[in-house]
Image (tube, coloured by chain):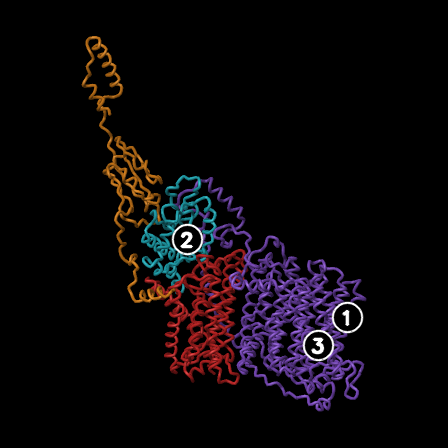
Amino acid sequence: MILPYLGQSFKNLFSKPVTEAFPAGDPPKAAEGYRGRLHYDPELCINCGMCMRVCAPQAITREIVPLENGDQQITFTYDMTSCTFCRMCSDFCTKKAITLTDDYMIVGSAHEDFLVSGTFIKAAPPKPKFTPEQLEAMKKAAAAKKAAAAAAADGEKKPEEKAEAKGEE
Amino acid sequence: MLQNMIDSSMKKSPWIFHINAGSCNGCDIELVSVLTPRYDAERYGFKLCGSPRQADIVVVSGPVTMQSRERLRRTLAQVPEPFCVVSLGSCPRSGNVFKGSYAIDGPLEKYVHVDVSVAGCTPKPEAIIAGLAQAAQLLEEKRKEARK
Amino acid sequence: MTNVLLYAVHLFLFPGLLFIVVMGLLLAGIDRKLVARMQNRVGASILQPWYDFLKCCGKETIIPRHARKGLFLGAPVACFVILISAALFIPVFGGLSMSFEGDVVVILYLLTAAGVAIIVGSAASGSPFAGVGLSREMVAMISYELPFVLVLLAVGALCGQDSAYGVTFSMDEIVRWQTENGSSLLHPAMIPAAIAMLFVIPCEIGMHPFDIAEAETEISEGTLTEYSGAPLGVFKLCHCVKMYVMTALFCALFLGGLSTGILLVDALLEVVFCIIVTFLCMTVPHAICARFKVEQVFKFYWTFVSALALISLLLVWIMR
Amino acid sequence: MSEFISNFPILAIMSLFLGAFITSLLGRKNAVVRNVIVFISMALALIMMLALIKPVFIEGKVIGYWLGNWAPVADWAIGIGLEVDALSLFFGLIITVAVFVSGTYSFTYMSHDDSLVNYYTLFLMLSGSVLGLVLSGDLFNMFVMIEIMTFTAVALTAFRNTYEGALEGALKYLVVGALGSSSVLIGTALIYSQLHTLNLAQITALLTNDQNIVTGIAFAFLFIGFGTKAFLFPFHPLAADAHAVAPASISLMISGVLTKCGVYGIIRLVYCLYQNIDRPFVQYLVTAFGAVSMFICVTMAFNQHNFKRLLAFHSISQVGYVITAVGLGTSLGLASGLYHAMNHTIFKGLLFLTAGAVQHMTGSLDLDELGGLSKKMPRTCILFLIGAASISGLPPFNGFGSKWMIYQAAFEKSSQTGNVFFLVVCVTALITSVLTLASFVKVAQSVFFGQLNPKFENTKEVPLAMRIPMWILAILCIVTGIFPGSVANKLLMPAVNAATNTRAYVSAMMGEAYAAAHQVVHAGAADVQLIGVYSPMSWMLLLLSITSAVCLVAVLGSPEKKKLEPVVGANVPNGPMTPGSIPVTSQSREADERELITDDLDPKYESFFSGEHAEYSQVGGSDLFWGFKKNWRHYFSFMHEWHSGILNDYALYGACSLALTLLLCVLFL
């Protein structure tokens, strides 16, 4: 009953071993569709936070540092020691800022070896033209005007007010 | 000279002891596959051994569950010096998807200094080999350091 | 003075300590390499047993609390010394040995004593795994002892047929008879015994399909559970030395008498034959078999292997 | 001087019997007086036996002594004679040494018991009767001594009658022992009816040329009678029952001394009285009895749970070796048998004494319950290991030398005669040796190694007074093992020659002329080519030199290893954390430390338990060799049924074996 193995083993003895050469040379390429080390492109990110919501192991952290000029420095950190490589973040990323590469060699000693992070600066919105007090005053003025106009005639919207509101946004 | 020979053979014959600290079995299977003909870690002297007393590299997989915590700690205590600890997969390092569970008392760093981590869920055998090789290298350094 | 010097050389250099250890490690390395190749792998380097041994020497030795310290540390040394002295009684081709009348039984008992040293060491470690391991070791010992004894008796009966007692228990006598009448393997009655001996060797050593006592996955290395550091290294070394002892015993019993008279050539011949025997009896089963169960080992040795040895013994009986 | 020395045999016997008498008179008041009397009488007997070594062993004399100077009249020996040749003295020496050791051991060992005067009186009577048996030159006297021996032994077996089974064991011994004694008596009567004499020398001379069917029947009776005393095959269960309950010092006497009387009787019978060991039938008979008891008892021992019961079965197994070797009928066989008989007394005595030590300190003999005592009783453990190595025949202890000679003798015999029977015997002996080893591994694991039962946490080492007798035996084990050559030349060869040289035996008592008149063959000095005797000295040196070399290397290598220790902290759990690691909340850290303290000691030195907290889990006792037992389960269940424990059955087995032997003797002798 062991004779088939016997023949095979003798055949093996005189044939080339199937062992990969790996640690000697480059690591072999992973199969297509392999979900390896995550790649994050901060340039595409719009800081929507969707990836954090869908991440089951909570491997994604976001750090927001306000800068002097009102800009925000936003850092997304993807912890590879916490990742389950499910690709949910990538799928949900509307801007395709997250992709999973086929780099599976995620080996290291320090914690930093396992972090994939990207930083981008979110520019602050342009400064509003008016301060809130002015706006308040303007609103009041507008209201007064409106009341006056209503009294005078039927209400029509003021184009300049709309523009102001848009700017504030 | 003998001591130098011992130092250099430290990295040439690292014996592995594998602790499953509540792993889902994925990493465990991959660790065994490292010894299959295709990956054949034995050519670097790696060998799975059955007792922590003989181990040079302790491979831990799984988030440290409450059940396995005491066992893990006791087993780690029984490994003779010098030895390396390798965490296998994402779980020991962070808890992975089990993070925050009432049944988890991780991470592994809480109990022992992890020398090398191999991340991935599960890591590919090549990555495991690379990690183990790195740990083997560390063994020699540790022994040299100990001698000084 | 020269006698003492020669004795020391015999003891520590040529057929002695150094040669035996080097041979043992070499055989173990070759065996490991060949097994790997037969399993389509690259395998560890031939020097791997050296590395293993040296590494073990560099590790910390932990003595468990429940262990009896003296016996725990003494057992590996005792095992090693016993094996070396057993090896000294086995003639290298050309008859270099410390042989004396009736040393076959001494070799048999020294090999048993080496097993007992392992058993005592593991018992002294106080671990329940070691308890299971030593029980298995003992069962394995009972298993191979019967065929082993029968093989030795068969060879003794064949090679001692011309002596006054009709039997010999002397290695020298066995080798001398083979020098005069050709190797006993050429004798048709001896072929079953040789096959039986080939089966006995791996079990005696505890090689893979029969390593029930040290089953690492089932009982955490069994007898060696608590061993670490240098004592473990010595036990691993003993394992290698045993490989040499058993293969050299096979060569002496069945392939003796091929001496050319030149010491170097004889030693080389011995090495080659040892490697061949190692390949046949250890590498092949190791490569193609899974580990046996305890009771399977017992049944296998007491039926099939014993029957082979017994056939041989009876054939010798009839043919003389 | 030689005149005076010829009084020594009777003086040795008398010193023991008188000691018994005086002990019971004076020993009631004061324990010290009692012990002194016992000690003096044992020592006197020992000294007298030692004094006989010179004339008997070295000068080769046979010392005859007629009680009351009743020398033979007109070639008819009417008086009671003592006759000491080398064979008798060989056994006499064994016996006195064993008695001495057992007695000195008892002083401390029996201290827990009361009514010790009775104990020592019976003990000395037992010793005296055994010595009387081997020194006696008279068949009826032998029977008397056997009777004294049996009854005192029965009383001593039941001495601790509070033990469960003590009275049962004693009763079995009494009934089956009486069967043996009466069969000796019947044999004696038949011989007397035919030859009209009871003197051994005269019987020897008369039987040389005149053996008829009645003497054949007498042979069967005597053989079975002595076989009962040696607890041979169908009689072995009662030995186990008796040993298990008897005090250890008495177990030593029963196994080391009483069985030797049976062996002595059989040797005397087949080599000297009947001189029929050359006949194949007798060889088959004796060897078969020996081989069967050897094998069955060793397998029975495999299944025992009681330390002393196990030893008891081994005791019979080893006696089986002796009888097997004796039955081979060659000089080498006899020499190896005698050697093994001596060794058996030594190592089995040692083992029984260690069993007694364990019982004394723990109160238990249960192999399933004991364990891990090597930590508590380290010296006893070493002594036990010496004994176990000896009985398993590991070199360089004495069991190896004698077992080797037995294999050699058996294989040589089979080789010379071309007889497969002796080959089977040889292989059986070798297998028995391995099984012996296995069951002593079992004892070692389940008593001394493995884990300590919490029950025996407070066990202490046995007192020195008990260790000294054990050490005497242990040193004898080693000495007789290392110098088998001198043992063979100085002790065995004279005894073998004496056993085969019947002419000297006859002429010492009845005169040279009488021996010549009956054509008693004069066997020359036995030409034992002791190729079986090895000289371990040379390779003991070798072992020593290699050991020292290895130790040297170990010592040279060690200093660097010590430096490793300070670094340990870096990687140990709960050790200082390296800065890069994830900080631990103080709460959990504290909790961890508290848990660690409840572990009370560093887990590093706990045994590996797959990470579990090490708890009492002894692997031992009956669970140990299941791999072996499973394959033999049918055999073992048969044996289990067969050893029913019912006295009627055992008596029946005895009667059957007697009947069978009778039939065979009538048919073939």
Residue under label 2, please give it.
Answer: B18
Q: Is residue D548 visible?
A: no
Mark number displayed over residue D19: 1
Q: Chain of mark 2?
A: B
What SS does tag 3 mark? helix
Shown colour of chain C: red
Output the letter for the chain in orange: A
Residue D656 against residue C231 in the figure, above or below:
below
Determine the residue located farthest toward the top in the rendered image: A151
Residue at image position (78%, 67%) is D23
What amino acid is labelled 2 in the image? His
Q: Are marks 2 and 3 on the same chain?
A: no
Residue under label 3, please give it.
Answer: D134
- Where does the image place residue D146, in percent across and percent down from the top left? 73, 73
What amino acid is labelled 3 in the image? Val
Disc 1: CA contacts within 10 A as few (<14), some (14-19) or many (>=20): many
- Quarter of the image for residue C285 reads bottom left
Answer left or right for A93 relative to B7.
left
Output the letter for the chain in purple: D
- Where does the image place residue D528, in percent across and percent down from the top left? 59, 83
CA separation in Å, label 1 and label 2: 70 Å
Answer left or right for C54 relative to D200.
left
Q: Chain of mark 1?
A: D
- Where does the image place residue D408, in percent across and percent down from the top left? 55, 78
- Quarter of the image for residue D302 reads bottom right
Residue D648 against residue D518 in the figure, above or below:
above
What amino acid is labelled 1 in the image? Gly
- Quarter of the image for residue D151 reads bottom right
Closer to the eye: label 2 or 3: 3
